[in-house]
Amino acid sequence: MKHLLTVTDLDAATATALLDTSDRLRQALLGREVRKLPTLRGRTVITMFYEDSTRTRVSFEIAGKWMSADTVNVSAKGSSVSKGESLRDTSLTLSAMGADCVIVRHPASGAAHRLAAWADKDRESTGTHTSIVNAGDGTHEHPTQALLDAATLRDRLGSVAGRRIGIVGDVLHSRVARSNVFLLATLGAEVVLIAPPTLLPVGVAEWPCRVSHEIDAELPGLDAVMMLRVQAERMTGGFFPSSREYAVAYGLSDARAAMLPEHGVVLHPGPMVRGMEIAPSVADSARAAILAQVRNGVHVRMAVLYHLLAGAPE
Amino acid sequence: MSDLFIRNARPYDDDAVDLVVRDGVITEIGSGLEAPDGVETLDAEGRVLLPGLVDLHVHLREPGGEESETVETGSRAAALGGFTAVFAMPNTAPVADTDVVTAHVRRRGAEVGLVDVHPVGAVTVGLRGEKLAELGTMATTAGVRMFSDDGHCVNDPLVMRRALEYASALDVVIAQHAEDHRLTQGAQANEGVVASRLGLAGWPATAEETIVARDCALAREAGARLHVCHVSSARTVEVLRSAKAAGVTVSAEVTPHHLLLTDAALTSYDPVNKVNPPLRTAADTQAMRAALAEGVIDVVATDHAPHAAQYKDTEWQAARPGMLGLQTALSVVVHTMVEPGLLDWHGVARVMSERPAEIAGLPDQGRPIAVGEPANLVLVDPEEPWTVRGAALASLSSNTPYEGMRLPAVVVATVLRGRVTARDGRVVERTTA
Amino acid sequence: MANDRRGDAGGEGSGLPDRELLSASDVTRTIARIAHQIIEKTADAEHVVLIGIPTRGTVLARRLAAAVAEFGGRAPAVGTVDPTLYRDDLRRRPARALEDTQVPEGGVDDALVVLVDDVLMSGRTVRAALDAVSEHGRPRAVQLAVLVDRGHRELPIRADYVGKNVPTSRSELILVSLTEIDGEDRVAIRRGAGE
């Protein structure tokens, strides 16, 4: 593995290996006072976030630090990026400084792909093998989120294969949904997208999943339900008439959560809009694996860094 | 220097002949002709001879975008691509919405002298789609025959209606970039399977189809001539077919890239494949080819859109749309239309020379290869394949989507009114000013 | 890791048959002998922990613990620690899969830890395992038990318990098979293609 740009790059064996590594890393750190592994000593990991995201950035940063990598945060604000430096030049600069890994979040779909193409092209001139990790690009993908969701489902359900997972909400604009649909399908899960037609992309029929507009009909058959965040800016776009109507039609209320089978798990990638897509009582219930998702996030990201950086460069 | 003797050429791939050109006009055609004394001879070695190509849709970027292309570099690319006339779109800085700017573009083209550069005037002031530009003044004092807000659609139906009505009295054509901007807000790629997987906001084909349908109705009522730029979707073809059947004077163009490339190329996110309208599906390219063969789509126009590296070597969303086309157009048409048997060489002459000249009202271009006709010609080696290298193209920019592709057909020579402007892949400079 | 020293079954191509160093009964006898030695040398230790190095070291640790209990010693706690994350040669090969790490309840603080592995060669795996164990606490002392010592040390490391010393050339492979993993108990040597 040279870069992690999309879950499509992961076959079932590679994805499973990442999840296994994540489990082993959790094991290796279990019960220890000093949560530090020497594995990535001397490697430089840069997080470069063009969008605000405390959760993901901190998770990657902790992952890097626990592996003893030197982690450096670059935020678009206050750096040369805000002075109009192109992504191309930023990429060249970071590689020239010897960045072994650049973890990027960017509002443009495909930004990580571009960085990876440039890093490979610049390899000779910069003398650095820079690995790119996609930490969320536009409305395209967020691969480590899907991996941590899969890790959480594996913990809670024992396996992902053969399980039926519902993904509810704004699929159209969701990189989390895209990564999850394709990763979970690769791992053998049955995925059901539940959303109004305006929040589903044209072409979704070709995805390895089923589509439904009826959440109540689906809940009893789901092993897990993943509630997507509804972004406030979509409210004005006319994608649905009102937040009230959305909450009534697609929100995960107590009554709806009760329709899940006994073992049914509730996931949310965060940050949550409580009362909108999920009732506070459901978010805080035993079904909710939301904190487990956050914890797994660190281990999964450690696993990604391990697979990208620990071995010999490809 | 506009005398020329062409030996052993096969017009439209028919029987080989020799041609004598005097003062830019074909004066003799026959076999076994003697080369006149002191006249430059072009030995065609049995290759295909066509009327010089005419491109209704190029962006030469001058004035204002000289970091991407100039009239000179664009003219060189045109001559090397086999073109003897091109129409330069008005989205320059300043916009070509006055006779001053349009006259300037024409003059720059004449100064370079490699290809006839015809300015396209803007339909509305500043391409803003609100207020008609001075179409009459541009038509009468600067000889502008075609108007377009290309890059933008004249979206307001009332403005479009007035433009068509006003144009009908001037006998000029309005070329519409058909895109309902309300339906393509933020659009980055063809709305469909590929874009949804890549998380790129979709440009629905209906945004083209609905504007073309609307404009055909408006043109019918106004009795005006409408030209539809860069048709990209199969459904638009059906709209054009029924409009033509109903007697609307509408013509349409397709670009070489919409004949060959599909949105499958987008998975690398390399913005060299970003263009407006976007690359569509394989079914659409098939429909484009069929419509061009059938004549529902009249012509091939390149939409040659050079962009300097800084506008393309970016993330997809930030990149400017557009791709080079002048030097690859004929090869792509041969590959997509001639090789599969959809067009013969008469057909190529029709869609790349005769019909474009007719639509734009050019009296001296797209003419038959016959005695008494102007010697605007292109000599083509249809067999010879070549590999496209953006850096080797004459354009100032190198944003070709065909990088590394092997394509058939090489332009051996281009002749503008008897003067050879390009030969064996090199521009032939004028010896006297 | 232990796996790497085994060589794969495809290694038959060397043309020479594997030479048996220890038969199944030899393996059983050897484990019994090491267990007796452990009992003897840890008699005054309050808290003994056997830590296997995956994968065959882990199996051996379990067998040794059972043998110690059987021969009248106090049953030691058994754990396993994967040294991979502490290796100094990670960058020389593609990233490898991680193995189990399970420190027994009670930890290793003030314990007499006996590291157990199948084959000792360069000592680098043991060095990494020492680092890994020390991250989990501060043992009173650490000892090392191996089934085979084949020489070629690259670090100042010596085993406290050795099943069999086998002089080898670097091109040779030591193949350790254990019933739990390989279906039989056996130690053999395979001539390499030669260096």
Image (cartoon, coloured by chain):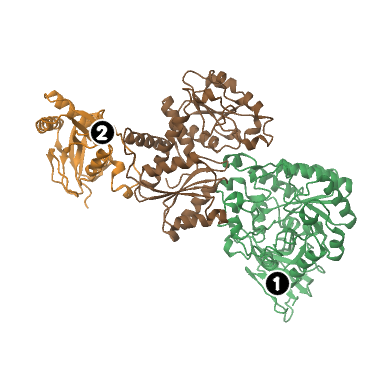
Chain colours: A brown, B green, C orange
Q: Give the SS element for disc 2.
A: strand
Q: Amino acid at mark 2?
A: Thr
Q: Residue at x 72, y 61 (%)?
A: B93
- In the picture, the disc for residue A74 is none
Residue at the extreme left of the image, as rendered: C40
Placement of A18 over or under A114, stated as above or below: above
Q: Amino acid at mark 1?
A: Val
- In the picture, the disc for residue C80 is 2
Q: Position of residue A255 (x, y in %)?
A: 56, 18
Q: Position of residue C18 (x, y in %)?
A: 19, 40
Give the image quarter of residue A158. Answer: top left
> Dot 2 falls on which chain?
C
- In the picture, the disc for residue B420 is 1
Q: Give the SS element for disc 1.
A: strand
Query: Is any part of residue B264 visible from this angle?
Result: yes
Q: Position of residue B73 (x, y in %)?
A: 66, 67
